[in-house]
Image: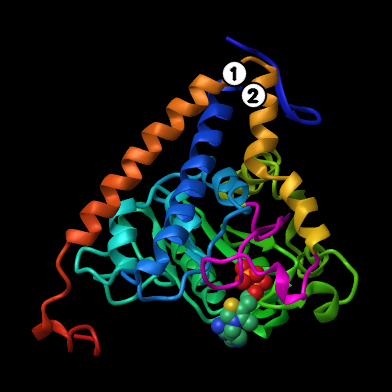
Amino acid sequence: MVTGLKASPGIALDPSLATNLFREMLRIRMIEEEIAKRYRDEKMRCPVHLSIGQEAVPVGISAVLRRSDQVVSTHRCHAHYLAKGGDLRAMLCELMGRAEGCCGGRGGSMHLFDPSVGMLLSLPIVAASIPIGVGAALALKQAKRDDVAVVYLGDASVEEGVFHESANFSAVHRLPVVFVCENNLYSVYTSLEERQPPRPIADLARGHGLHAVAVDGNDVVAVQRAASDAVRRARSGSGPAFIEAATYRWREHCGPNFDNTLGYRSEAEFEDWKRRDPLEFLARHLTEHGALNETQRADLAAEITAEIAAAFTYAEAAPYPAPDTAEHHLYAG
Ligand SMILES: Cc1ncc(C[n+]2csc(CCOP(=O)(O)OP(=O)(O)O)c2C)c(N)n1
């Protein structure tokens, strides 16, 4: 048993926790790479926004959440759902429009709703889920539950007025909500510096009276530590918190491909971020401390490969919604 493992400066890390974090990130990476590979088969007929390169954020956050905590997410939601304990088969069925999808096959990749694991919803309209997550936090507080709401948002979301109204409201009412901003530097093809002045995004939250921190979003241990503090504060009635996690998306904004040839970001920048791969960052430390060797890593990958293959086979054979249900869910009641 290795003790005192350090994955980032000053953070002692339990090796079994670290191995679990690695496994979870690897699983999400491999699932999304398989989605990218199979996308051209045209069985997934919805847009997909992949989180490859960003896995440390949801894995670090979910490491401190309970099943009953409530998560709201964005268009880039696969990793948020999977890290929260979402069902892989239900997610793939959803991407393929099958009736067993977590949204009945009617929503697709950007609508992963699954109350059974506390995945309240994900929405494609930028910033739209933020006030809903704050509303969920208000409901938790009114019900005197000690669960928290987690609101995932991209760096572009803070350019929408509703973010500011929601942050203000959450601070005034000391709501149990943690905002998690995945700052991946781009909104589609537009860089952060073309859209916002040079200041930390966390400062915006601080300005609204939230407890706010900025972390290396590719260091899963740093994310987990920030999440632990933020969630503890929110759970204990100390009010909302905001985590700005610096990270980087490897693939195109929407779709399975790499897009560095488009010119909106440089190859050098991409390579620089690839060197900061969240999986390899943790793997290096695990290996250095004898907690992960090549055989263990290969065994993990083989186990995950088998799970993914079985889930795709299942989803591809699953039925579509019956045609006579096409008009269901259009109107309340
Ligand atoms: C209100 C609104 N405006 C524009 C869009 C188109 N759009 C979809 S995703 C996206 C970029 C969002 O960037 P960010 O929030 O930083 O998240 P990321 O895609 O980088 O994860 C935009 C502009 C939208 N869906 N909703």
Question: Which picture quadrant has residue 228?
Answer: top right
Q: Nearer the viewer, residue 82 or 206?
A: 82
**Which residue lies under the disc numbered 1?**
291
Residue type at numbered disc 2: Leu
Question: Which picture quadrant has residue 243?
Answer: bottom right
C-alpha distance separating marks 1 and 2: 5 Å
241 is within the stretch colored magenta: yes
Does any atom of ligand 1 lie closer than 8 Å to the CB of label 2? no
Residue type at numbered disc 1: Ala
Position of residue 62 relative to residue 181, above or below, is: above
x, y percent for residue 210? 73, 61
Q: Quadrant of the N terminus?
A: top right
x, y percent for residue 170? 62, 68
| Disc ID at residue 74 | none
Question: In this picture, which residue range is highlighted in magenta?
Answer: 238-266
x, y percent for residue 239? 64, 57
x, y percent for residue 177? 58, 59
Residue 214 visible in this rendered orientation of the protein: no
